Image (spheres, grey):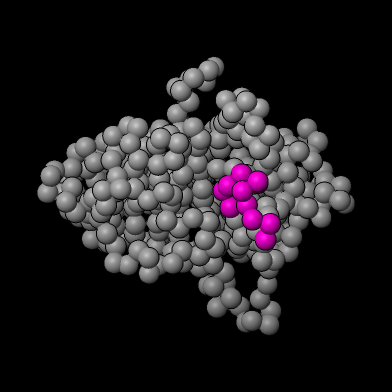
Amino acid sequence: MGIIPSFLQTGEADEATENMVSAANQFITSLSAEQKESALYGFKDKKRITWNFLPDKFIPDVQKRFGLPFTKMTPVQQILAHGLLSSGLSSQGYLKAVTIMTLEQILHDLEEQNPIRNPHLYYVSIFGEPSNTGNWSWRFEGHHLSVNVTITHGDKVSVTPSFFGTNPGEVTSGLFKGLKVLKQEEELARELVGLLTEEQRKTAIIANTAPRDVITGADIKVDRNQFDPALGIAYADLTGNQRKILFMLLKSYAYKYRPEFVDQITERAGDIDENKVFFAMAGDMTSGKGHYYRIQGPTFLIEYDNTQNQANHVHSVWRDFDGDFGEDLLKKHHEAIPHEVAE
């Protein structure tokens, strides 16, 4: 058995994708012709692989965020947009996503009504025609949140790049004091580091200072060369309890999505050699100190960075070296179908 075994089945992936098709088509049906021009794109449109996690104001004009924003939706359409978001996420993931959106209002209040902080500046984009047989995708995106779901053959699913961030990482005052959206992602890593022996730390800690942000940023494709050779401590060199904590940390990222999709992605990856999964950290994992960690396998990369705003501003991302935006699935799709008839 590999280090990431198949998860317990909780339903069929094709049933879950049917839910997404239904949610997407209900949203599309509610749109006016003008709104459709903002929300709908061809599956081959280059915008499908363009993403970002910054506030709108800080995105260069050449990369300006697109899609239909909540600010231009009716209340009913906003509900349907949330229906699409929830159709791809687990209950835990959906709760984290909407709480991240709520943080924009908290920032708006903390920063004396700063106009760039707006919980309605989240955008929905759909690429291709939602169906149970073809290729299509959707994105739900705004500050600190980018959910990208790609479906091929109607039932094969990719969920990367997946970005969840929080500012503040922990709310320190006001009505929501103590709110910490990405608590598991921070505290499990801190627990794992605390369990390492001095000898293990020499391998796991790759730098005394954390980078200012996740290394991959909003790159369209991860440069594998930046992470080769892999640094950090191998899963194989951890003890039983340390392995358990690392596995729980991995699940805190994967289980933001529907278990059916996670199971499918895990099955595609197959058994993973325990010598080829690494945990690496940089900086100081003490609360309030800047820190960074990553978990790297042959196909996947998870990054977490908390350095900004006196280490109270979190960026976390799950990437796939070969399969962001469903590229691995699409490659297999085109290899299986003659080019002239492929979608």
Locate residue 70 relative to residue 35 in the image: left or right: left
Q: Find residue 255 and report its horizontal and vertical position in percent.
A: 45, 43
Name the image quarter holding the C terminus: bottom right
Count of all numbered marks drawn on residues in the image:
0
Residue at the front extreme of this rendering: 112
Residue at image coords 74%, 60%: 41
Where in the figure is residue 80, as x and y percent of width and height? 73, 39
- Going by the picture, which residue comes out furthest to the right? 33
Which image quarter: residue 63?
bottom right
Q: Which residues are magenta?
A: 52-62
Residue 209 in picture, x, y percent from top left:
30, 48
Question: In the image, 291: left or right of 29?
Answer: left
Q: Nearer the viewer, residue 58 or 161?
A: 58
Q: Is residue 167 magenta?
A: no
Residue 133 horizontal side relative to residue 195, left or right: right
User: Residue at left 44%, top 40%?
Assistant: 308
Residue 23 visible in the shown view: no
Image coords of residue 301 (percent x, y):
40, 56
The answer to whether residue 113 is seen in the rendering is: yes
Q: Quadrant of residue 169?
A: top left
Q: Residue at x 43, y 49 (%)?
A: 213
Position of the N terminus, as image quadrant, is bottom left
Q: Residue at x 29, y 38 (%)?
A: 285
Is 231 drawn above or below residue 262 in the view shown?
Answer: below
From the viewer's side, name the closer residue of 76 and 11.
76
